[in-house]
Amino acid sequence: MHNRETGYERHPGNPQRSGGITIEDRKRTSSRKKDHLLICCDNAVEYGTSGFNDIRLVHNALPECNLNTIDTSARFLGHPLKSPLFIAAMTGGHPDTTEVNRRLACAAERFGIGIGVGSQRAALENPDLEDSFTVVREHAPSAFVCANLGIIQLREHGPEWADRAVEMIDAQALCVHLNPLQEAIQPEGDRNLDGCLDALAHLCDGCRYPVIAKETGSGISAETARKLWSAGVAAIDIGGFGGTNWAAVERERAKTGEQVRLGEHFLEWGIPTAVSLVEVVRTGGPIIATGGLRSGTDMAKAIALGAELCGMALPLLKGAMQGDEALIHTIEELHAQLRVAMFCTGSKTLTELGRARTYITGTTGQILHTEE
């Protein structure tokens, strides 16, 4: 089907999806967003290890720097940030998610850090839900904000939906998320990914904003990274294994039947974040390290391995669900840990931290050794 506005050849898929979005479609998408939020907060959805426990920063007993003047400022895609902490995509698309996004946005503005919203599909299908996303720009007027669209929706609706997602929240960049495992486990998931790479390349070729390719918890390999760079993405968010596990989340949603068994079977599927980071760094950059980072020290390790930003979702979501003060405390603690790690490696800036030496041990070291 040809889209006259964009000139993009829409992928021939489900006629209902390509020809129009029903009220039932809209209700299902919005309800799913609330389900995801509640499941992540109320259930054990973290599985495996990110690999950061196998990474050790080399201690510097003569750091020759002042802890009080450590500079954590970063620059990403031309935007200045006060810290490499990035509030990773979490939620939106249901009225009950609006307050969480408001709290996250206020924190992004307060600390001068970047923030990504959750998938905007629900609001693109139903403009009545836009408030759950526009609240981010309203409360973070000067923050670096990333819009979010699934690669399947990009393929089916073309660049027009990508443009609308960016315009909806006045974003500086667009994350196109890749989540094949989640789609395979999700009861109502989209299981045909044919033509997605071409759709991504088409978007990158003509859009006016940087596009970030983002996995959602299974990691990105060097081979996939090279395809993404060739398609024209400006950055990659590796979204590695070891944090929130979407096979576990969708298993909880399915409750019974074959999808539950599939979710159980694939709980250990994916590339550990530390491994994915090392692989993708070798192919180019810039890179956001997301997936199981749980401390400021993990952030320091990620920067030392080559990341430019460090994405976190679940630790910040739990803080945001408790209230503004809990979220602020969480971020302050992460920043304190990051500064001490920088101090104890003799790194006055993130650039210097990026040159800090590391020991890579355990399973992570074994995996990376087999690739050499």
Image (tube, grey):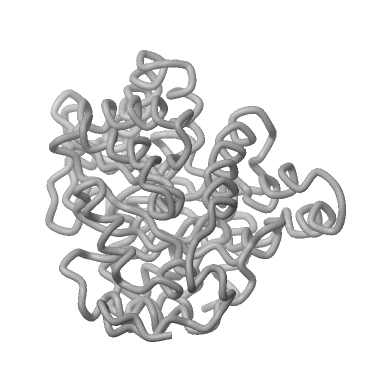
Farthest residue in the top direction? 325
Name the foreground residue: 204 vs 276: 204
Q: Which residue is at a point 25% across and 55% down the rendered structure image?
A: 166
Residue 19 in the image, given as x and y percentages of width and height = 48, 72
Q: Which residue is at a point 48% across and 28% down the rendered structure image?
A: 96
Q: Which residue is at a point 35% across and 59% down the rendered structure image?
A: 175
Image height of 310 relative to 198, above or below: above
Q: Evaluate whether residue 60 shows in this view.
A: no
Residue 262 in the image, given as x and y percentages of width and height = 79, 59
Classify residue 200 by image quadrant: bottom left
Image height of 52 relative to 17, above or below: above
Residue 159 in the image, given as x and y percentages of width and height = 30, 71
Say which quadrant the N terminus sits in.
bottom left
Q: Is residue 43 left or right of residue 178?
A: right
Q: Which residue is at a point 49% across and 67% down the rendered structure image?
A: 220
Residue 161 in the image, given as x and y percentages of width and height = 33, 64
Name the foreground residue: 115 vs 165: 165
Q: Is residue 83 left or right of residue 270?
A: left
Q: Evaluate whether residue 295 shows in this view.
A: yes
Name the foreground residue: 6 vs 147: 6
Please tell me how many numbered marks the rendered image carries.
0
